[in-house]
Image (cartoon, coloured by chain):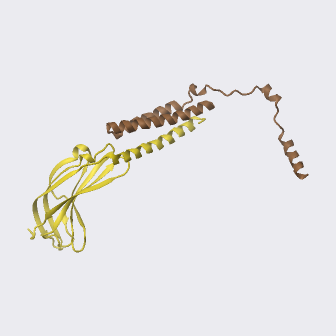
Amino acid sequence: MHTVGYRMNAVLTLGVTILALICAMASLADNLNLPSPSAHVQVLNINWFQKQPNGNDEVSLTLNVSADLQSMFTWNTKQVFVFLAAEYETPQNALNQVSLWDSILPSKEHAKFLIHTTNKYRFTDQESNLRGKEFNLTLHWHVMPKTGKMFADKIVMTGYNLPQEYR
Amino acid sequence: MDWQGQKVAEQLMQIMLLAFAVVGFLTGYVLESFQMMILVYAGGVFLTTLVTVPNWPFFNRHPLKWLDPSEAEKHPKPQRQQAVNSKKKSSKK
């Protein structure tokens, strides 16, 4: 501590160490937040349902997605990524996940939404297993903090059915 | 900066940084603003730098009192070489 250089070095070293410490504490404080998210998805219409020339089933849906994820946001939240996935079982795979729609919620004000949309990404099966298939719609989300640990969770909504015939 | 000043500067630096970290964290948590925490802490680091890094007169209140040259002459340093020689001789015997 006998010269300006040494004192500058000491201030910066301790300063950055403590900065890392308070960032870690901010991340840990996120565990105190107990979110109570809610989501509801309605399939309004099956726009069309067909077999592609290569033999894969493809379906187009019109959806109403409403969700309230405001309780996910804390002071340490940068943004929340949400996506809606169709999940179903086929003889080949126990779990198939097809992403139908996604969004980035940049702030708490945008976290309560009601969206009327067709599926943003194609709902295609790798075989022709979709006729009469029962599927779940699952809203997944990833909470991205400013510093520290990322959180992910989901809400599973069951009891959706595809029609028996192509249309 | 004298010895006492160096000790004070180091302790002051540690206490100030810790205090600003605590204040910044609490401010950020209460106001739910991460930016506020960073701003308070950045201000604290800047202030700490300003207080403890330059060689303020405040840190030079306890200058070392060296002995008077005449006092030093009365107590001459022991001669090194003689001491080494006598050791060698004694070990040979």
Tell me if A31 is positioned left or right of A117 in this view: right
Q: How far across and down, in percent of the image, does residue B80 sit?
A: 83, 41
Q: Nearer the viewer, residue B16 or B47?
A: B16
Compared to residue B68, the image places residue A18 above or below, namely below
* The colour assigned to chain B within the rendered structure: brown
Residue B3 spot, x, y in % from top left: 63, 32
**The quadrant where residue A132 appears:** bottom left
Q: Residue at x 30, y 44 (%)?
A: A74
Residue depicted at 16% across the width and 56% down the height? A41
Q: Residue A75: tell me if it is visible.
A: yes
| Colour of chain A as rendered | yellow
Residue that lies at the very extreme toward the right in this rendered image:
B93
- Residue B33 image position (x, y, % from top left): 33, 39
**Residue A147 falls left or right of residue A98:** right
Residue found 67% across the figure and 28% down from its top = B64
Q: B51 or B7: which is nearer to us?
A: B7
Name the quarter where the N terminus of chain B is drawn: top right
Q: Position of residue A6 (x, y in %)?
A: 57, 38
Q: Is residue A136 above or below residue A73?
A: below
On the question of residue B1 being in view, the answer is: no
Total labels drawn: 0
Q: Quadrant of residue A52?
A: bottom left
Q: Quadrant of residue A153?
A: bottom left
Q: Looking at this view, is B76 or A25 the one in front?
A: A25
